[in-house]
Image (tube, rainbow, N blue to C red):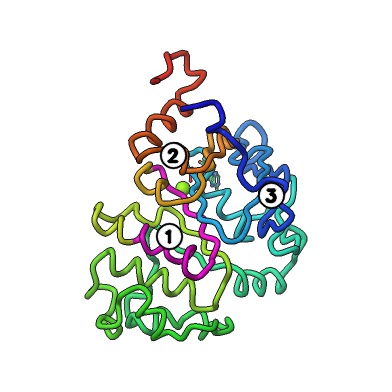
Amino acid sequence: MNSDTVTSVGSNSPTALIEVNEVTKRFGNGIATVTAVENVSFTVPSPQFLAIMGASGSGKSTLLHLLGGLTRPDEGSVSVNGTEITKLREPKLTYFRRQEIGIVFQAFNLVPTLTATDNVALPVLAGGKQGTQSVAELLELVGLTDRRDHRPDQLSGGEQQRVAIARGLVTGPPILLADEPTGNLDSVNGTRICELLQRLRREQERTVIAVTHEPEVAMWADRVLVLKDGGVVADFETGHFKNAQDLAAHYHELLHANDGEPALC
Ligand SMILES: Nc1ncnc2c1ncn2[C@@H]1O[C@H](COP(=O)(O)OP(=O)(O)O)[C@@H](O)[C@H]1O
Ligand SMILES: [Mg+2]
């Protein structure tokens, strides 16, 4: 690693799609209080594929939920497309989420009784606005046209995750948030999901933010934010690294810094 590896990417960008400003989120109270995210600030330009890395419990999911307006911070603000979402109340917050955000979870969360087509259409049936791409076009985009009438139990894990991604895109959101989208997949299917996320950023100019603890997944992104104990400890472009092993070495060095152990490299 050279010293310019840890550079802030996209900060102070005038065209930021997402602005996170000194955000803190705590759970519980009294001596049981857990600070899940602590004083985090960064911006995300559009489009960008951003990976959020960190050990289990470092605050990745909480940060993703804050970006999607699923959780409200105790301090600080989150703005998306010029709207300070942390000030929105219902029903405006739900409206914002339907317009701006698609969400994909590790566990896919498909409705077991519905076909792939109906699962993808669900956010529209639930009151969202159909985006510019039809359900059939989205199933084609994720390579599942021939599986459109299958229910989740008739699909592989990788196929189910691709249905979940198509569902996340059906309202045409500029932002797709994905929490450990490859966490339940083998490496071949995981790679296919990463390829798809990268295509969404490159061909459709979407901003994709994916939580992962796998350097092989993060390497597909443009940029990586590393969390440790709820704070950002690094913000770098993947282009600085030769390959996933190189990125992994830097990542592990960051996670073990100040642990009293010698650095890995
Ligand atoms: N709803 C919750 N109630 C209480 N504690 C929570 C809640 N969600 C997360 N936490 C705590 O906040 C910290 C960060 O959690 P999380 O954001 O899920 O981390 P990660 O996704 O990196 O594993 C952990 O200590 C976790 O136990
Ligand atoms: Mg998590």
Residue at the disc numbered 1: 198
Q: Is residue 151 left or right of residue 108?
A: left
Contact flag, marks 2 and 1 (Cβ < 8 Å)? no
Q: Which of the image's four quarters has the C terminus? A: top left
**Sequence-wise first label, 2 or 3:** 3
Q: Is residue 19 left or right of residue 36?
A: right
* Vertical relation: 146 (above or below) 11: below
Number of residues whose C-alpha sits closer than 10 Å to that of mark 1, classed few (under 14), some (14–19) or many (20 or more): many
Is the CB atom of the residue marked by disc 2 within 8 angstroms of ligand 1's nearest atom? yes
Alpha carbon distance from label 1 to label 3: 23 Å
Q: Between residues 36 and 191, which one lies in front from this camera angle?
A: 191
Circle 1 sits in a helix, a strand or a loop, which is it? helix
Circle 2 sits in a helix, a strand or a loop, which is it? loop
Residue 211 in percent (x, y) is at: 47, 50
Residue 210 in percent (x, y) is at: 47, 54
- Residue 204 in the magenta stretch? The answer is yes
